[in-house]
Amino acid sequence: MQLLFTILLDGLVYASYLFIVAAGLTIIFGVMKILNVAHGGFYAWGAYTAAYFIGSASEMGFPDWFGFLIIAGSALAVGIVLGLLIERIVLRRLYDHEEILIVLATFGVFLILEDLILLIFGVNPYFAYQPMVALGSVEVGGIFRDVYSLTLFGVALSVAAGSWWMLTRTRWGKLITAVIHDREMALIVGINVRRLFVVTFCAGAVLGALGGAYIAPTVSVAPGFAVDVIVLSFAVVVIGGMGSIPGALIGALLVGLLRALAVHKLPELELFVIFLVMSAVLIVRPEGLFAPAKARKI
């Protein structure tokens, strides 16, 4: 029974931060129809920026809880700065080109961002454990867990609720829905689609950076550590349906729980079971479990 509870807890923690990263990925695809491989770069830059400044703040004598402000600030700064630069310099020139060209361009951006990390932060790992130490640990069902990991549930739920509210209860959400269903018609009725694209891309980039920044205190931030997470985030989005926030939530839960089960029972099949499920979903429902309905054009 304790093993089952451990698997459930590990799975929910992993699913939470996978959802935060995948939500940014699926928002960008849903609005802009861009499969953004550079999202892994946002994740890595968020983690490195947070880890670097948390370590620096600790050396200067700031209290451990100050790390939470650094995490939020790092996610916003990385997402807005990199999002604006990439949208203005790269993507804006490619909107009218084929999708495969945009995918290759974002892959090139991802490689550039990875190399810039090596140039700026070096090859040595960074440790930013201070926020995790500040919260201590707690006994849950007979298992001692660090409180910091459990707060990921709250962050993921906040992202899900905030995305739902923004898309269904605000003017921006209605504009986004109009662009998703018919971009040409949205242009005709006077919606500033270019500005909507900039805001959407930066919002997705902030979520990618937030995933990296929030996970930084729990891992060793080292070169290449973002690759596995971004591959699994793509699996989450594919399973749930590209462009669907509820789909990303369900996909993250599936992937998180399956990975936790495999890690505890059959560690050699950790990735195999995830991609087996993804393949099964693609065979039965190629557009994903909760893909948004497409508007029918006459």
Image: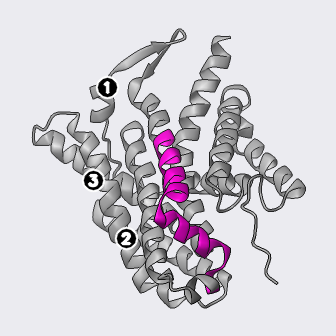
Element type where label 1 sits in the image: helix
Q: Position of residue 189 (x, y in %)?
A: 56, 85
The C terminus: image quadrant = bottom right
Q: Is residue 176 magenta?
A: yes
Under mark 1, the amino acid is Leu
Under mark 3, the amino acid is Gly
Element type where label 2 sits in the image: helix
Secondary structure mostly taken by the magenta-highlighted segment of the chain: helix
In three-dimensional space, the C-alpha distance between marks 2 and 1, rounded to whole angstroms, equals: 31 Å
In front of the other: 112 or 124: 112
Q: Is residue 288 left or right of residue 60?
A: right
Q: Which residue is mark 3?
A: 73
Mark 2 / mark 1, whichever is N-terminal: 2
Q: Residue 82, labelled with which disc? A: 2
When asked about the image quadrant of residue 57, the answer is: top left
In three-dimensional space, the C-alpha distance between marks 3 and 1, rounded to whole angstroms, equals: 19 Å
Q: Is residue 36 visible?
A: no
Q: What residue is drawn where x is 37% and y is 49%?
A: 213
Q: Is residue 106 left or right of residue 235?
A: left
In front of the other: 291 or 221: 291
Q: Which residue is mark 1?
A: 135
Q: Is residue 158 left or right of residue 282?
A: left
Q: What residue is drawn where x is 30% and y is 61%?
A: 77
Q: Position of residue 42 (x, y in %)?
A: 43, 62
| Magenta stretch bounds | 156-184
The N terminus: image quadrant = top right
When asked about the image quadrant of residue 149, the answer is: top left
When asked about the image quadrant of residue 127, the answer is: top left
